[in-house]
Image: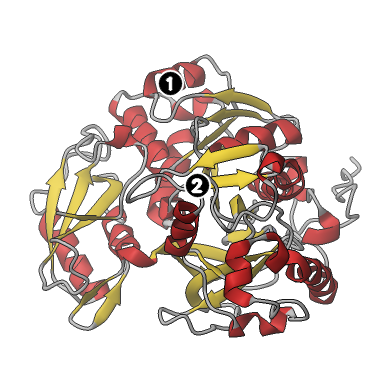
Amino acid sequence: MAQPDTRNPRSGRRPGRLADDPCDTYVYDPEAECADPGTLRALAEDAWAAQAAGLADRAPFYRDRFGAGLAGLTLDDLPSLPLLTKQELKESQLADLPFGRHLGVPADQVKKVYQTSGTTGSPSVLALTAGDVHDVWRRIGSRAYFATGIHAHSRVLNTFGAGPFVAGATHGVLEHLGACSIPVAPGDTGRVLNSLTIGLADTLLGTATFATHLATIIEDRGLDGPAFGIRHVITGGEPGGGIPAVRDRIAAAFGARVTELMGLGDVSPSLFGECPEGGGMHFAGQGLVWPELVDADGNPVELRPGAVGEPVYTSLVRSAMPVVRFRSGDIVEIQPDGCPCGRTSFRIRCIGRADDMFIVRGVNVYPSAVQEVAASFTPWVSGRSRVVVTGDAVTVDPPVLVEVERGAPGAGGAAPEDLAARIEAEIRARLTFRARIVLVDDDSFGEAGYKTRALVRR
Ligand SMILES: [Zn+2]
């Protein structure tokens, strides 16, 4: 029998291996996603030149910040400019309600407004022009979602909320990709289970916490997860889907492949998407967003495999509310180069939020490292856990309190009596500090099982 032609009809590239979905071997935007670094650099440099030339005229915030000093700067000059924080954008907004002094267009050109949930204070307002929605967010989102495995034939159970939140932009991307979209309110477990049971979807989109919550229900009730016919589970909104034990558990419960995506409202709600090869999320903002990496002090970190740092973004193309060197607050690790899928962009794993880092005996710790150790005890634990810190302390004296959610009662036999002590010993061995593990029941994390705060302060 003749071998099927698996070349990508748009890029002409042959995949590294034959995937189970022929579309997995395609790339949404091969001209950008498979381009060589020199071509991409030239594309980005042109876009930046146009952005930089007009920014100070368009937005008072940038006029005050840079004067006429922005025009003529190249991308290589960006590290000499100050970093931009969420707090500065918030102050800019309050100084000129409703949109702020960083609005880069007349207000009547704003055609879409999102209000981010905001961890403190009132929500931040994100304004977009029609071009920002269609030519920037939708294009980046299409690259990212296509990479994760959502294609025109997909039937996607989308549990990311629409409402006022930027995750709502996902709905436009799904529509653009031609996928069948089945929206469900975040955390509406009943409706999700019904959709799964009657075979509505082949793709599940949600947070890792929610997917884990569903895995627990599948195990608890002895349901046949693979019989739902879900082929892809795509997680986003938090780093959990990158933790191997969490990912494996979701994959096993559904008999599905798990990939992740990630973004941020101030830049693009989906900015990275993981391809079928696994191995991390590809950057998807080619020619539209310029990424840098910085350390905790804001100094540049070279963006190469193995590097760890905080991504900083500059809008190359964005009319309303462009950002210049915006601190994401995420901490990521750059993954190895050379993905067989043909995409040339760098890949990342998200380690956590910079805010969540704490220090034990002089050693920096991200809660995701603790979560990873705890999750390795599945099925006795669910995969969800969180570090509990007193007040706003950054330095924590051991033992560090960690709440770990128990696994489903029926899964993997009864948990050993000394489970908490075993997890404590493993944390001691791998992370070199003492922890105090408190096992908690499912649902005690609240939030409708939708997102897990990796670190809580009490
Ligand atoms: Zn890839």
- The amino acid type of the residue labelled 1 equals Leu
Give the quadrant of the C terminus: bottom left
Residue 418 or residue 196, whichever sits in front: 196
Real-space Cα distance between discs 2 and 1?
42 Å
Which of the labelled discs sits on residue 287, or is there none? Answer: none
- The amino acid type of the residue labelled 2 equals Leu
Corner quadrant of residue 352 = bottom left
Mark 1 lies on residue: 193
The picture places residue 277, in percent across and down from the top left corner, at 64, 56
Q: Cβ(mark 1) to ligand 1 < 8 Å?
A: no
Q: Secondary structure at mark 2?
A: loop
348 sits left or right of 21 in the view: left
**Residue 57 visible here:** yes
Residue at image position (45%, 25%) is: 185
Determine whether 111 is above or below 190 in the image: below
Mark 2 lies on residue: 97
**Residue 324 visible here:** no
Residue 41 or residue 18, whichever sits in front: 41
Give the quadrant of the N terminus: top right
Residue at image position (68%, 57%) is: 284
* View quadrant of ligand 1: bottom right
Residue 328 or residue 387, whichever sits in front: 328
The picture places residue 159, in percent across and down from the top left corner, at 49, 31
Q: Residues within 10 Å of mark 2 (few under 14, many from 20)?
A: few
33 sits left or right of 245 in the view: right
The picture places residue 449, in percent across and down from the top left corner, at 32, 35
